[in-house]
């Protein structure tokens, strides 16, 4: 059973640091997981991309909704 991981990210709109919960990416999953979560401070939609690198580390990239 995989556990949720808490991460701090910076909102690409307002720059505030916010905490999000990530579901781990499955080891055999080739594509990245994408989803949108609203900023807890400015309420704008943040596009979140989750991947796993070669060492198994979870990588999180955030961007504006339209990027």
Image: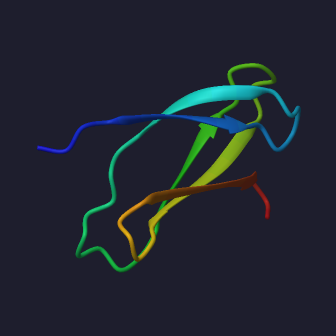
Q: Position of residue 31 (x, y in %)?
A: 41, 76
Left or right, 31 with respect to 65, comes to: left
Q: State whether residue 37 is above or below residue 35.
A: above
Which corner quadrant holds the C terminus? Answer: bottom right
Q: Position of residue 49 (x, y in %)?
A: 56, 59
Q: Residue at x 29, y 74 (%)?
A: 29
Q: Residue at x 42, y 60 (%)?
A: 57
Left or right, 19 with respect to 4, comes to: right
Which corner quadrant holds the N terminus? Answer: top left
Residue 2, quarter of the rendered image: top left
> Count the marks: how many?
0
Q: Nearer the viewer, residue 25 or 38?
A: 25
Q: Residue furthest toward the top?
A: 41
Q: Nearer the viewer, residue 20 or 35?
A: 20
Q: Residue furthest toward the front?
A: 55
Q: Residue at x 77, y 37 (%)?
A: 11
Q: Position of residue 37 (x, y in %)?
A: 59, 38
Q: State whether residue 54 is above or below residue 35.
A: below
Left or right, 14 with respect to 36, comes to: right
Q: Residue at x 81, y 27 (%)?
A: 16
Q: State whether residue 62 is above or below residue 26.
A: above
Q: Position of residue 55 (x, y in %)?
A: 38, 70
Left or right, 16 with respect to 18, comes to: right
Q: Residue furthest toward the right?
A: 14
Residue 63, quarter of the rendered image: bottom right
Colouring used for the render: rainbow
């Amino acid at each position: 059973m995989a556990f949720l991981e808490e991460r701090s990210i910076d909102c690409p709109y307002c720059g505030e640091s916010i905490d999000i919960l990530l579901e781990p990416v499955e080891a055999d999953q080739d594509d990245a997981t994408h989803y949108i979560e609203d900023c807890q401070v400015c309420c704008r939609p943040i596009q979140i991309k989750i991947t796993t690198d070669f060492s198994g580390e979870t990588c999180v990239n955030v961007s504006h909704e339209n990027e």
